[in-house]
Image (cartoon, rainbow, N blue to C red):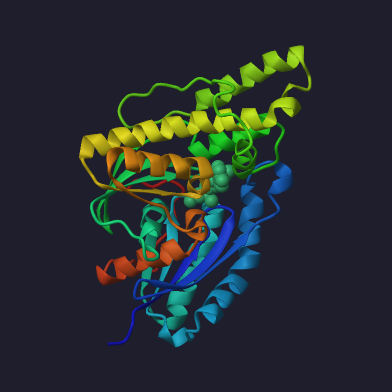
Amino acid sequence: STPITILGIESSCDETSASICQDGQILSNVIATQKVHEKYGGVVPELASRAHIQNIVPVVDTAIKESGITLNQIDAVAFTQAPGLIGSLLVGTQFAKSTALALNKPLIAVHHMQAHVLANLIGVHKPEFPFLCLTVSGGHTQIVKATSPLQMEVLGETIDDAAGEAFDKTAKILGLPYPGGPLIDKYASEGNPLAFSFAKPQVPGLDFSFSGVKTSVLYFLQKQMSEDPDFVQKNLPDLAASIQHTIIDVLIKKLKKAIQQTGIRHVCIAGGVSANKGLRAALVQLGEQLGVETYRPDFQYCVDNAGMIAMTGYYKYLAGQFTGLEISPSARASW
Ligand code: KG4
Ligand code: ZN
């Protein structure tokens, strides 16, 4: 039988990405990261939309070339429909629609957060259903229960900042450039995670809160700096390690609670923050402690990428979940 080939497009934030998925195997995953935002200390939506317009044609072209397929082999075009920055989503949506129209192939709308979860099905070491996924990125923090590729339920999520924001905002307080998450990770490896302690906001159930961590770090440093202006420079590794430890502790405690409440034995992490070495180690440790199997996507599938969109598109294709050309993206979206 002829294989099913899906072109996936991702443009929800500041990464322009395209991927080819054939029968559940990722043949290419091209990601163009936008550098323009660095000097502004965060993603500038208008600049992101512009960069997507510039990147999307070469990125898709490269993804098709690298995969070795030809255009006429594409069976459907999958794209991120929500959630994300609206101007960014519009570029990918319009490109996907035009391509589907030109190729006379069906269009598949993908929920970005569902795709982050399904990134765990890319590769050899994959979870069995049902599984739990802690999705931690710059925009989201969620614990999701997946009973099949297309059946998911959000068990808990952040009521304020995302975990990635907690990393980035505290990094900014330390004077580190954006995005600070990977730098906190780097400095933390040389520091003592118990050197300083910061507030861990208490939230009921499986929900999270991170805005208090940022405030706690800010007040602590204002006090220290008034006594010693070089405090941050002298203590950077210990500060990074202690901040990272605080954030990971909040995440892991809730994940542990979710495992105990549901009795689910397969547990994944996803999203940009799942690249964090400390979180990775804490997950493995939690798995050993509770006797559950743990998983994490390869780095290129942790961050925003079209591989996860094409993979989700593949499952939606099998289920016959197509969408019409009248579809619009949305910045926010429930599941
Ligand atoms: O999934 P992602 O690439 O984009 C969003 O959808 O937000 O996640 C980006 C987030 C940023 O907040 C970044 O600082 C964080 O992931 N991040 C990390 C690490 N690598 C990326 N945070 C902590 N440690 C890391 N190694
Ligand atoms: Zn994302």
Q: Can residue 158 be seen in this view?
A: no
> Which quadrant is the N terminus positioned in?
bottom left
Of 145 and 109, which appears nearest the observer?
145
Above or below for 40 versus 307: above
Dividing the picture into quadrants, the one containing residue 112 is: bottom left
Q: Position of residue 65 (x, y in %)?
A: 55, 81
Q: Residue furthest front?
A: 288
User: How many numbered circles does the render carry?
Assistant: 0
Residue at x 74% of width, y 26% of height: 234
Dividing the picture into quadrants, the one containing residue 177 is: top right
Q: Where is residue 264 in the image (x, y as percent from the top left)?
A: 23, 44
User: Viewed as shown, does residue 147 lie left or right of 285?
Assistant: left
Q: Residue furthest right?
A: 229
Residue at x 26% of width, y 57% of height: 128
Of 307 and 107, which appears nearest the observer?
307
Dividing the picture into quadrants, the one containing residue 187 is: top right
Q: Position of residue 196 (x, y in %)?
A: 58, 21
Above or below for 220 versus 287: above
Q: Is residue 183 visible?
A: yes
Of 224 and 203, which appears nearest the observer?
224
Residue at x 30% of width, y 66% of height: 316
User: Viewed as shown, does residue 274 lie left or right of 118?
Assistant: right
Q: Where is residue 244 in the image (x, y as percent from the top left)?
A: 54, 33
User: Viewed as shown, does residue 305 lie left or right of 127?
Assistant: right
Residue at x 54% of width, y 21% of height: 198
Above or below for 5 versus 89: below
